[in-house]
Amino acid sequence: MSLREIARRAGVSPAAPYRHFAGLGELLAAVAADGFGKLAADLDDAWSKAVGDPLPALGRAYVRFARANPRLYRLMFGAATDAGPDSPIGLAGREAFARLKAAIAEGGALEENTARIAAVSAWAHVHGLAMLLLDRQIPRIDAVDEEALVAAVTDQFVRGLRARL
């Protein structure tokens, strides 16, 4: 889809998007960066409501965000928005990642590298779980809905991670 097509669908002049974006890639990058901002806000909200260890609540919120916004979620991590670490997407992604790292560090004094590796492990867990659910790759488990499955799998992961820290 071109910027002109997006403008047509949005009901604005064909030139309007070009006042704000150099091309479609820049527009998609801006949408993806905004998505990371929304994800970070959802993680913050989950943390504020968490009782005890915030990490399971953040994991569930992450997967919930992906399931509620599948196209945006795929865009956030897709090749169309491939950008460097100092790009708006890279900076916004690091902001979301910082929530996981802070939740892990809240469990006790950890060396920086240990906290970072644990946070990458947690991110890989919830990202993989989200993608498996979005792609419908997890077999149905009798009497277990997806919300309960996410909670059980995430809680089990966090227990294992905390035991290793």
Image (cartoon, rainbow, N blue to C red):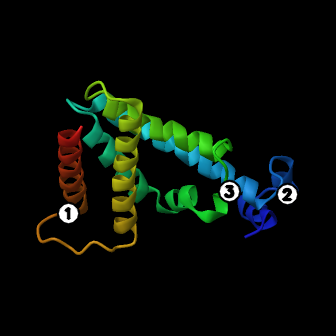
x and y percentages locating residue 146 in the rendered image = 24, 62
Nearer to us: label 1 or label 2:
1
- Per the image, the residue denoted by label 2 is 13
x and y percentages locating residue 75 in the rendered image = 57, 60
Badge 2 amino acid: Ser
Q: Quadrant of residue 1?
A: bottom right
- Per the image, the residue denoted by label 1 is 145
x and y percentages locating residue 14 in the rendered image = 85, 60
In the image, 41: left or right of 28? left
On the question of residue 51 being in view, the answer is: yes
In three-dimensional space, the C-alpha distance between marks 1 and 2, rounded to whole angstroms, equals 45 Å
Badge 3 amino acid: Leu
Q: Residue at the spot x=30%, y=48% of the render?
A: 60
In three-dimensional space, the C-alpha distance between marks 1 and 3, rounded to whole angstroms, equals 33 Å
Query: Quarter holding the C terminus?
Result: top left
User: Residue 28: which numbered mark, if any?
Assistant: 3
Residue 71 position (above or below residue 63)? below
Residue 83 or residue 150, whichever sits in front: 83
Residue 134 position (above or below residue 39)? below
Q: Neighbour class for label 1 at 10 Å: few (<14), some, many (≥20)?
A: few
In the image, 87: left or right of 140? right
Residue 141 or residue 79, whichever sits in front: 79
Q: How many marks?
A: 3
- Disc on the earlier residue, 2 or 3: 2
- Disc on the earlier residue, 1 or 3: 3
Badge 1 amino acid: Asp
Q: Secondary structure at mark 3?
A: helix
x and y percentages locating residue 139 in the rendered image = 23, 75
Q: Secondary structure at mark 2?
A: loop
In the image, 145: left or right of 75? left
Nearer to us: label 1 or label 3:
3
On the question of residue 40 being in view, the answer is: no
